[in-house]
Image (cartoon, helix red, strand yellow):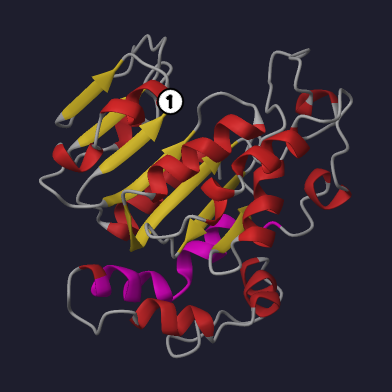
Amino acid sequence: MDRHELLAALHARLQPRNYLEIGVDAGASLALSRVPSIGIDPGFAVVHEIDCDVQLVRATSDDYFRSHNPTEKFDGEPVDLAFIDGMHLAEFALRDFIYVEAYSARTSVIVFDDMLPRNVVEAARDRQTVAWTGDVFKVTHVLRHLRPDLVVLEVDTEPTGTVVVLLPDARSTALAEHYNDIEAAMVADGDPQDVPESVLGRTRAVDPYRLLQCAWWETLVAERQGRVARASLSEELAQQDWTELRAAALGVAPLPSASRA
């Protein structure tokens, strides 16, 4: 499954009321949306047909979020589904997450692209290849260690992997408060970058087909639509053994049941 197939499946599975993406480029991912959408990119050149109510903003994400509130486009609703595929440097991707999370709900889903580089050269901060992930893979480590309340799942999509983040918290200030120190650590080392073997080998990455089958997606939608008690998703995910989930998504164990997923 490639990144756009995963994104299309998430649109179908989540039934989002709205969609936001950072990094429009030619519009391939934006073309998947059928709901009110915002696309942010300082240099987009859309060639794909867009079939939704879309606001295209030719600006950097820093400039956009400095002066705009995306919920105004979405009738006051939080961002339901977001795709971060902007500048391929870790500090930019982390800032993009901080921006998006501030307008999220606990049932929002935030997806990062280019999180599993296939080799060290592809992960360089100074671009040397046609296919380039940069060092955005570092954001996974930051989120897992500074925000243990988040569910951060590496997903084995082609060509360069994705990360799906669940249970965002718009009230959290942990990343913003420590951003300067985080950024300093992220940019401290020159190329070649020290890319963990678990990233290059995708040993912690879940299979996207198996992940999409997990029962708690239904709980996420039901909670957002008010058909189950608030925080039902949080409670279900809090009970989940993530080692089991990774094993399940890799296809080596039964999928979590609806009561345990």
Residue 122 figure quarter? top right
Kindly identify the amino acid type of the residue bearing the numbered disc 1: Asp
At horizontal 63% and vertical 74% (from top left) the residue drawn is 248
Q: Residue at x 54, y 87 (%)?
A: 239
Q: Position of residue 143 (x, y in %)?
A: 62, 55
Q: As rendered, which of 110 and 6 lies closer to the eye? A: 110
- Which quadrant does the N terminus fall into? top right
The x and y percentages for residue 45 are 37, 9
Q: Residue furthest bottom?
A: 259
The dominant secondary structure in magenta is helix
Which residue corresponds to the image point at 15% horizontal and 39% vertical from the top-left? 72
The answer to whether one can see residue 231 in this image is yes
**Where does label 1 land, which residue?**
62
Q: Secondary structure at mark 1?
A: helix
Is residue 206 visible in the rendered structure shown here?
no
- Using the image as rendered, state which of residue 215 and residue 171 is in the foreground: 171
* Range of magenta residues: 205-223
Q: Toward which corner of the image does residue 64 lie, by quadrant?
A: top left
Q: Quadrant of residue 191?
A: top right
Which residue: 76% across, 51% down?
202
What is the x, y in percent for residue 48? Answer: 32, 18
Q: Please give left or right for residue 237 compared with residue 143 in the image.
A: left
Q: Point out residue 100 in the picture as x, y percentages from the top left corner.
A: 39, 43
State yes or no: residue 219 in magenta: yes
